[in-house]
Image (cartoon, rainbow, N blue to C red):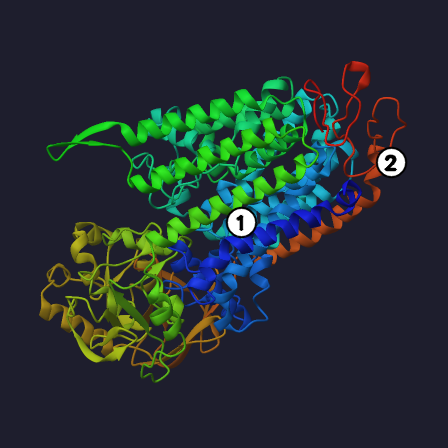
Amino acid sequence: MNDRLEKRGHWVAFFAALVMSLLVFLPFIIYNKGMFLYYGDFNVQQIPFYQHVHDAIRAGAFGWDPITDLGVNLLGSYSFYNLFSPFFWLTIPFPSSAIPYLMAPLLILKTACAAFTSYFYIARFVRDRYYAVLGSLLYAFSGFMTYNIFFNHFHEATLFFPLMLIGLEELLQNRRRGMFAAAVALCAVVNYWFFIGEVVFVILYFFVRTLTSEDCRFTWGRLLHTLLEGVLGVGLAAVVFVPSVLAILGNPRTGVDSLINGWGMWYYSNPQRYLAILHSLFFPPDLSSLPNFFMDHGAKWASLAAYLPMVGVCGVLAWCRGHRDSWLRRMLVLCGLMAVVPVLNAAFVLFNNSYYARWYYMPILLMCAVSAMAMEDEDTRWDSSLLTGLWIVAGIAVITGLTPKRSDGAWHFGLEGNAVKMWLSTALALAGLILAGVVLIHLRRRKDFKKVLAASLCAASVVYSIACVGGAVSTFHNNSWIVDKALAGRGNISLPSDGTFSRVDFYEGDENMGLYWEIPSIQAFHSIVPVSIMEFYPEIGVTRDVSSKPEADKFALRPLFSVRWLFVDEDANNQTPMPGYSLYNNQYGYNVYENQNYLPMGFSFDSYITQDQWEQLGEGARDNALLKGLLLDDKTIDKVSDLMKPIEDDVLFDDSDNSYKDDVKARKAEASSGSVFEHSGYTCKCNYSSDRVLFFSVPYDKGWSATVNGQTAEILQADVGFMAVRVPAGECTVRLQYHTPGLRAGLGLSLVSLALLAAWARFGGRLTGPAAPAAAPAGEAAPAQTPDAGLPQKDETEGGAPEQDGASGGPDKDPA
C-alpha cells in the first residue's frame, strides 16, 4: 500500500475527495431533480453568470456585454467570477440548458482537485504518503471550502494556491526554475483579486521560511530569483491581469475612502468578532448570510471559516507544542496575529475597511500539513490539545446558548439566532473532537489504525458537510422561482420588437432575472461594473454598492435608459409603481407592462445643464432634470456651445407631471432610429436639420471609439457616466465600437514575459550554478534531486526512534 501511495497518492486523494463530495451533494441533486440549488449569491449570481458568459463565449461576444447592468466590459467584469476558470471552460461544449445541471458536478470536481493539488504540498512534510492523503482531505473539506459553496468561484483560488507554494519550495530548495512563475501566472489569471492576497502571503512565507529554517537559509540570490520569477509570472498573466485591473481602477470600493483608518486599524470595535474568529477554528461554519453564534459581529459574507473536519485546530495545537522552533509554527503564529489585528488582516484586501477573512485558505493549507504531521507522529500529545478544544467548544456553546438576556420585558436564555442550529453545530464539533480522541489516542496502537483514522476522517467530513449544506438548503428552501421563472423563461419571453435596442425593468422581482433571461435590464446584482455606473448613481441619490436597483420613484430614469418593458410579480400588491405604463400581458408569473414613455437609444438635446445648476438641484429632482438637458462639465460645454444653450432655471427646476411628459415628448422628437447592438457596439441612424449632440445611455469607458458616417468622432462624457457624440446635419450613421482596454498591451507583455521565462529556465542555471543536493537521512547517501527533497527525517544520532511505517520527524526537527 505504501509503495502504491508513493506513486499514486495524489490520485488516491483525488478520487477519495471525488466520492466524498459526490456523497455530500447527491441528496440535494436528487431533491432538486438533477440540479443543485442553494441560496443567495449561488442562485442569483453563480448560475446566471455561468450561463450568461457561456452563451457569450459561444457566440463570440468577447468585448462589450449589453446584458449585464447598463453594459459592461465582459472580460473586466467576469474575470473575477468565472471567465478564466478552467472549470467554466469545461461547460463550453455543452448547450446552455445544461449549465444549471453542471454546477454540482463542477463543485464536486473542484473539491477533488483541491485535494489533488494540496496533496503535493502536504506530501513534502510527511514520510508516509497516507497522511498526505488525509491532510489533503482536510483541506478539500475544510470549513472554508464548505462555507464558500455560496461563492463557488472562490474554490478556484483555493485549489490552485498550493501550486504557488510548491513552485516556491522547488525554487528555494531545488533551484527548479519556472515552476513558481507558472504557478504565479495561473493564480493571477484564475482570480486576480485573490492573487493580491496571495502575493502578501507568499512574501511573508518567503521571509519566515528563509530567515527561520535551517534547510533553506536566506540569501540575496534566493530573494532575487524569487522576485524575478514572481515578476515574470505576473507578466505571463498580463493578458488577463492588465485588463482586469484597469476595469476596477477608480471603483469606489477600492478607492481612498474605503481604506481602513483610525482606531479601527488596531482593534475590532465589536468584541464579538474575536470570539467569532476563535469559533471559526473549532466549529463548522455558520451560514454566510445568517451568522448564528455571533449575529452582531458584522462579518456577513466574510468567509470567516477555518474549521478542519473532526480535529478542528487541535492537530495544529498538538504539533506546534512539540515544535516550538519550527518555521511553520512561526508562520501560523504570524497568521493568527494578522487575523486579530484589523490592519494586518486588511493587508490581504489592499487595506479595505470592509472586514473579510477570504485569505484564510492560505494558512489553512499549512494547518492541514501540520495536522497531517501530528497524525503521523506517534509522539504527538493529542490529549491536552483535544481537551483544550473540548473546553473551548463547550465554553463558546455555554456563552452563546445559556447567557440570560432581557428583551421585550421578559427574560430569555441564549444569544444565538437559532437554538437548534447552534446546538447541532456544537454537537458536530464535540463529536468530531471525541472521535479524534478515540482514534488518535486510544486506537493508536492498532494494526489497522491508519484505516480507522481514514474512515473516521472521511465520515466526519461527509457528515458535517451534509449538515452544513442541508442547514442552508432547509433555511432557504423556496427555490421554485429558479425553475418555474428564471430557467423556464430563458429564450421564451415573447416581446414585440422592431429590432431597436431596449431594456427591461423589474419591480421588486428576483435578482438578476434579466441575466437569466438574457435580456438587457437596468436591475443587476453584480459587483464589478464600469466605474462610470458607480459614479452616476450616487449623484441621483441611488446607492450603488454591489447592485443596481434604482427605486420606482426614480421613474424618469426609465426613458433615459431606454426601458420599454416593466415586469411586476403577479402577486405584488402594487401593480402601478410608476406612471406611464400599460398592461401588455402575463408571462412566467409576471405582469408585463409597456412603457408609454420609452425612448430609443440615442436622442439629442438642445440645452445643457452646468455643474453649478446640478449642485443646486436636490437629489430627488435630478433624474427628472436629465430629461431636460444634457449634464456637461465646463470643458465639454466649450466643445458644444455653438450647438447648445444653457438650460433656463425655471425649466430645470420644474418637476411637475406635465413637465415630465413634455420632456419625454421633446426627446422622442429628437430620437435616432434603428438603434441596435451588434459586434460589440451600437449603431443607429439619425437625420437632423442642423448639427446635434446625440446622447447614449451607455457607460463611459476608455475602450469606446465612435464614427459618424465612417469618420472618427470624439466621444463626450455626459450625465456623469455616459456618452454623447456630436453629429452633423443630414442623414448619419453613428457607430460606437468597443475594444477591451489593456488587452493588446497585456498580450504583448505576456509574450515578452514568456520569452524571458523560457530563457531563464534554459540558461539561468549557468548564472546560478547547479541545484544543491537534497539533504540525506543520517547514514545514507544523498538521494537524486526530486520534488520531495528535504522531507523531515528521523535522525537516530539525535535520539530519534528508528524509522517505522507511519513515523514522522522527531518533535524538535524542522520539517521541509
**Residue 364: which quarter of the image?**
top right
User: Mark 2 belongs to which amino acid?
Assistant: Ala
Counting from the top left corner in percent of width and height, residue 615 is at 20, 50
Q: Quadrant of residue 573?
A: bottom left
Q: Residue at x 32, y 64 (%)?
A: 522
The image shows residue 543 at horizontal and vertical percentages of 27, 51
Asked whether, in this view, residue 334 is left or right of residue 36, the answer is right
Find numbered disc 1 in the image and state the secondary structure of the residue it sits on: helix
Q: Residue furthest top?
A: 798
Label 1 crowding class (10 Å Cα cut-off): few <14, some 14-19, many 20+?
many
Q: Amino acid at mark 1?
A: His
Mark 2: few/some/many CA within 10 Å (<14, 14-19, 20+): few
Q: Quadrant of the C terminus?
A: top right
Disc 1 to disc 2: CB gap under 8 Å: no
Residue 119 in picture, x, y percent from top left: 67, 42
Residue 230 seen? no
The secondary element bearing badge 2 is classed as loop
629 sits left or right of 778 in the view: left
Disc sitting over residue 155 in the figure: 1
Which residue is denoted by mark 2 in the rendering? 784
